[in-house]
Amino acid sequence: MMTIDLLSLEAIRHGLTGRTVGAHIYLYGEVDSTNAKLRALARRGAADGTVVLAESQTAARGRRGAAWFSPPGVNVYASVLFRPAIAARELGVFTFVASLAMADAVKDHGGVPAIKWPNDVLVNGRKIGSALVEATLRGDAVDHVIVGIGVNLNVEPADLRAALGPAGRFATSLAEECGHSIDRNAFTVSYLNHLERWVATWRTEGAAEILAAWRGRDILTGRRVEIRGSGVPFEGRVLDVDATGALVVLDTLGGRHAVTAGDVRILD
């Protein structure tokens, strides 16, 4: 049975060390999704760094529209608004910073994280969390970016399997992997602080620094994989992730592919 551990705005605000992320925080009991709620706030002029948190979500979606299991009081569902002065082609960096911040927070709480392209954080080979980055454009310029994450902290393994069906065997929670319950407020603070730090690094040192850090935690480079959902399925070996966030794969016939969407299955 899941133990409910409610989020506390006071505890979260007390732990934040940055000046932008979390300057404005909204905490809801239940939303359709934190990204959708923050999108509405952004249209009304919400400031850079605004955060939306929720105890549960009723219609959360991950990459490619996949449903995200979001029971109340056990995980972290968070979205953060940024208003960067960048072109649309530069948006890939936000998936990198979200993954890095999630991985750092997992490490802070006892997990040994790895990152799987494009946006998943794994512990012991199973998915613990994922990011969904959405942007609103004005022509070719970015008006705002929403970085949303869902991280399984204390959800019961049986509940994951019941909700996800066969895919449940590839998912896990931080509590399951570490053998103890995780303080949701402390994890939220850790994630938001790391997110601010990585965004600051990007702003001062550029996307190359972020990509280098991301590559250091990537589990796909050099692996043989199958790519599905991005045109005709094919097999190949991962060479790299490029500056735009595309997965560079060399197929079995020697052709190079810059994969920007699709599902990756590791074959070796």
Image (spheres, helix red, strand yellow):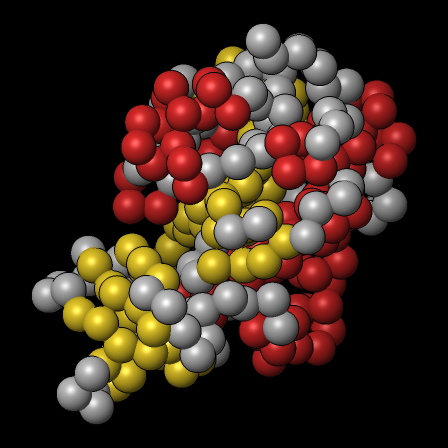
Decide if residue 254 is on the left or right side of residue 181: left
Task: Write down the quadrant of residue 214 in the picture.
Answer: bottom right
Give the percent coordinates (x, y) of residue 48.
64, 46
Q: Which residue is at a point 15% across and 64% down the rendered structure image? A: 233
**Quadrant location of the N terminus in the rendered image:** top right
Residue nearest the viewer, comparing 152 with 62? 152
Quarter where residue 225 is shown: bottom left
- Looking at the rendered image, the quarter that the C terminus falls into is bottom left
Q: Position of residue 76 (x, y in %)?
A: 61, 30
Which residue is nearer to you in this view: 4 or 24?
A: 4
List x then y, in percent, for residue 200. Answer: 73, 63
Q: Residue furthest bottom?
A: 254
Task: Say whether residue 45 is visible.
Answer: no
Where is 251 relative to 122, above or below?
A: below
- Total numbered circles: 0
Query: Which quadrant of the view contains residue 78?
Result: top right
Q: Residue 251 placed where, x, y %? A: 23, 81
Depicted 3 relative to depicted 240: above or below = above
- Residue sitting at 77 percent across and 22 percent down? 9
Most distant residue in the left direction? 232
Q: Is residue 94 left or right of residue 167?
A: right
Name the residue at 83% across, 40% down. Answer: 16
In the displayed image of the protein, which residue is found farthest to the front?
268
Q: Residue at x 26, y 65 (%)?
A: 226
Using the image, determine if residue 52 lies above or below residue 132. above
Examine the rendering and report whether any part of residue 59 can be seen: yes
